[in-house]
Image (cartoon, rainbow, N blue to C red):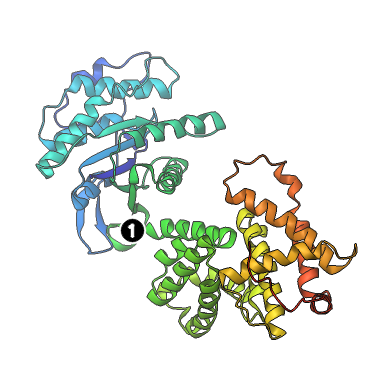
Amino acid sequence: MSKVLISAIGAGQPIIKKVPNGINERSIDAVMQDNVPFQIREYQKTEYRFSENGKGYVTSFVAAALATHLKIDKVILVGTEKSMWEEVYLYFAQNADVYIDDNFYTDLGTKVENYKHGMPNKVSENDLKKVSEVIDAYLKKLRSDAEGGSRCFLMDYGMKDEELIKNFKTFMNIADNLKEGDEVYLDITHSFRSIPIFMFVMLDFLETLKYKNIKLKSVYYGMLEVRREIGYSKIVDLKLLFTISKWIKATYDFINYGNGYLISELINDEETSEIIKNISDLINLNSLKNLRSNVDKLNNLLESKKAKIDTPEYLAFRYLLPYVEDFAKRFHGLSSNSEFQFRLAEWYYENKRYSSSYICLAEAIITKILELYKSSGVDVSITNKDDREKAKKLFKNFANEPDGSPLKKLHCEFSEINSIRNLIAHAGFAEVRNVKEWNLGNHIKEIRKLLFTSNLPEEIKRLPGSMQLPENSS
């Protein structure tokens, strides 16, 4: 695992008739060609000061301040063909106390000028290998055990889709140069605004993919604009933006799939976090009995926590809270276990978790039958496996009822639903028709009417021997 700084560089400001220390003036003159002057460029020197501890570094490169402060192992520099690569080379070579190749410096500067004036022989990534070497030398001077392996990459401006696609591929190439578990620090101070934003989005993408388990540790911005007001350039950590991005994913996962795992990680409240995690586990395991009790706990807990919603740890959760409350209230205060199972089947259907919906729907029917028997004085348990198997046998009797009766309809619905549920349980190896023809939505509508709005209790009572479950399920 290494600490990696990814930084973008811009074009800098041209400064005419100034030759840097260590560079032969005749070398500058030698590259004057076709009336294209070689313009020496640089970033303005300033004191970069970190917000977290007030530590300051006087430098023209924010990347140098970050590398020093964070004890970086390697630097990934990203820029365009117009970026001031020659000044990057000169700065890091000078500050690493290594030999400065003035011919390389002027040749690199000339290639940048060629690009600006539409001439051939532009900068290539092969030209930037020597730049990478002096950056590594600088890092080694700062810390002898710095790993090294710095790289420079060229990106397009991103003014059209083709350039954005190329930049996407370039960034994935950058990712390939990272190692498993690397900690990445992103600097978005310089370059076209589109490039730092693009890099931020790509790092978010990589972390979502869990690509090499890369971790974005911080996002830094050097505020050059404020130095006239406060006397220095403040470096601020914008990691909160990345946290907000995580909250976006957490919200989506919870609203659409009932997965609160990311919420439980982000929210700074152990009690709430634990219940949300438990609910997510129980939803994924279809553990309906425990799920119901945990949903009730969440309802009560959210009511008691509302006074804390304005505290910092609830910064993002306060906006997600209505969705969590809506989920919890959907299952709160239901009169029976069959209704809870049915509501959950509806929720699964709405969120396209069809296999779980079929399972809950079939179980809701069985539970309802057992509840009707229990209310009539029969000694049954809705959670007893044997009693549930006996209840399934009753549906065969319902097949003999008149067409159009609630019991005959319930028999037809249960037979169809349970058949599909069994296919799902066998992981799809059985031959089945098109999934779209399963009509889950119609099944849910029909079961709602049959279980909760029809005269089903009276229908069961009038059956001969209806108040006795079969002795065995064989």
Residue 405: quadrant of the picture: bottom right
Residue at 63 percent of width and 41 percent of height? 430
Say above or below: 345 vs 141. Answer: below
| Visible residue check, residue 323 | no
Can the viewer see residue 388?
Answer: yes
Q: Is residue 86 left or right of residue 95?
A: right
Tell me the residue at 68%/56% (across/down): 418
Q: Nearer the viewer, residue 444 or 256?
A: 444
Number of disc labels:
1
Instruction: Write down the residue under mark 1.
Output: 236
Q: Is residue 468 above or below residue 56?
A: below
Q: Quadrant of residue 448?
A: bottom right
**Where's the C terminus, which quadrant?**
bottom right
Say left or right for 231 vs 141.
right
**SS category of the residue bearing label 1:** strand
Image position, residue 409 (x, y; %): 83, 63
Q: Position of residue 25 (x, y in %)?
A: 19, 23
Residue 81: x percent and y percent?
39, 27
Residue 271: image x %, image y %? 40, 77
Dot 1, crowdedness within 10 Å: few (<14), some or many (≥20)?
some
- Taking the view exactly as shown, the residue that stands out farthest to the right is 403
121 to 216, vertically: above or below: above
Rendered position, 98 above or below 352:
above
Q: Quadrant of the N terminus?
A: top left
Tell me which residue sits at (33%, 46%) in the image: 214
261 lies left or right of 351: left
Of residue 178 and residue 234, the one placed in the foreground of this image is 178
Instruction: Please tell me which residue lies in front, 270 or 97.
Output: 270
Q: Look at label 1 and name its amino acid.
A: Val
